[in-house]
Amino acid sequence: MEKEKFIKESKKRIQKCLEVFEKKYAEYSKHNGNIDDDYFYAFKSIGNLLKETPEKVAFMYMMKHFQSFIDIIYYNHNVPEEIFDEKVGDLINYILIINGIKKEQYAKLKNNYNNNIDDIPLTC
């Protein structure tokens, strides 16, 4: 595949991921029937119930999709393109969710240390 075609296809894939985020917002952020401004509410809530971090919860959810992707790659090369695209999108979305959760944590940590990065413990 030529570079330009790859970039074009990648942009379309990312756009589809953003559309899924818009659709899933209400599901991920539900809080007692109301919409909470915290996009990661569901991962935090389940994390509290399971005594796990929200990023670990998101990673566990992602692993289900990763197993499906493994099955496609190793055992069923003839799945329809729509199914393959959906699985790729699921994995990208969970990586972006985990990234967002970690970025939120890093921002809070930096704020706690008054943005003095040198004071942040390396074990965070």
Image (cartoon, rainbow, N blue to C red):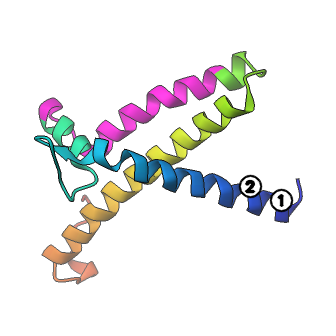
Q: Nearer the viewer, residue 102 or 83?
A: 83
Asked if disc 2 and disc 1 are in contact, CB closer than 8 Å, the reply is: yes
Q: Position of residue 101 (x, y in %)?
A: 31, 55
Magenta stretch, residue numbers: 49-71
62 part of magenta stretch: yes
Which picture quadrant has residue 48?
top left
1 part of magenta stretch: no
**Total tally of numbered discs in the picture:** 2
Q: Looking at the picture, which amino acid does disc 2 mark?
A: Glu
Image side of residue 104 versus residue 82, left or right: left
Q: Nearer the viewer, residue 9 or 115?
A: 9
Q: Position of residue 10 (x, y in %)?
A: 69, 57
Image side of residue 57 versus residue 79, left or right: left
Q: Which disc number belongs to residue 5?
A: 1
Mark 1 closeness class: few <14, some 14–19, many ≥20 residues within 10 Å: few
Residue at x 20% of width, y 69% of height: 109
